[in-house]
Amino acid sequence: MSGPKQRGVALITAMLIVALVAIIGAGMLSQMNLALHRSGNIWQSEQAWWYAVGIENWLGKLLRQDAQYTEVDSLDERWAEPVDYLPLDGGALQGRIIDLQGRFNLNNLGTGNAEAAMAQFQRLIELVADTDTVTARTIAASTRDWVDADINPTRPDGAEDNYYLGLTPAYRAGNTFMISPSELRLIKGVTDEIYTALAPYISALPESTPINVNTAPPPVLATLAPNLPPTTGEALVEARSEEPWTSVDAFLQESAIAGTGDTLGADRLSVTTGYFLARGQITVDRAQVQFFAVLERADNGAVRTINHSTNVY
């Protein structure tokens, strides 16, 4: 009897060994497939990123050429045309260049013209975010406190460390220029809804900048001076659609803003731009990369990248 029993045990043992080998093999195969997919995704993401760098360089060349042939920057120029679909090897690209000086520069709140900038920002918040005056004033004053160098809150609605250190989690005020307008989410009074409403109309540039009236959207134009009707922006956009303004003086002659020259502040306006945002999405097989690059164009036309990022500007 011992012979058949031993053979039965040996058979069961062999079957267990085969089963274990099969399980281990399946696990190793699964891990290998996972590693292959991971490496493939990494490669595709890297390829998409290098495409983005190439596109960034191409857009810089486009801006350099534009500086050679035009003396103003407006939305009827080649750089302002969006690319809806451009086939690439293994994928596709879509994107555009945005004039960041057509937006309200949050860092203007930390400069010598802070009072005028704060008043405009308050008007912009009220207009596009549909907020009450107190909330808009609080956000404008607190943003000024975030980007200025001192630690003294703007009375009566501003906020410095004394406010932010009482939050959970606690943090300190920046007390320096913003790198990204997304920092506005940290400011006292700003909700997700308010930030989403403001995002298309704000920028964060490394210096104080005038607003390019040839590219600014209607809400920014409508808040250049106090007491302008909300429809002023649309009227100005319609006027420039016929022909861009060739100078700030020409802009100030528009009937829609007649009599407001003193409150507009010509030194806060421009018809040219030095800062642009290259924004796009590149798809390579299963990988997608959203890229943002802030480009600075000097007076001589030279273009350099200030910063670039993925997923958020």
Image (tube, grey):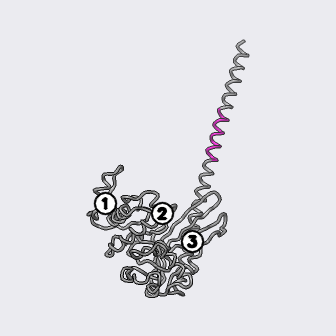
Q: Nearer the viewer, mark 2 or mark 3?
A: 2
Residue 248 versus residue 47 in the image, above or below: below
Q: What's the CA distance linking mark 2 and mark 3?
A: 20 Å
> Is residue 183 shown to the viewer in this render?
no
The residue lying at 60 percent from left, 55 percent from top is: 41
Q: What's the CA distance linking mark 2 and mark 1?
A: 22 Å
- The residue under label 2 is 197
Q: For numbered disc 3, what is the local secondary structure?
A: strand
Q: For numbered disc 2, what is the local secondary structure?
A: helix
The residue lying at 66 percent from left, 30 percent from top is: 17
**Residue 224 image point, x, y percent:** 42, 76
Q: For numbered disc 1, what is the local secondary structure?
A: loop
Q: Amino acid at mark 2?
A: Ala
- The residue under label 1 is 159
Residue 96: which numbered mark, if any?
A: 3
Q: Earlier in the sequence, mark 2 or mark 1?
A: 1
**Residue 262 image point, x, y percent:** 36, 82
Asked whether, in this view, residue 93 is left or right of residue 268, the answer is right
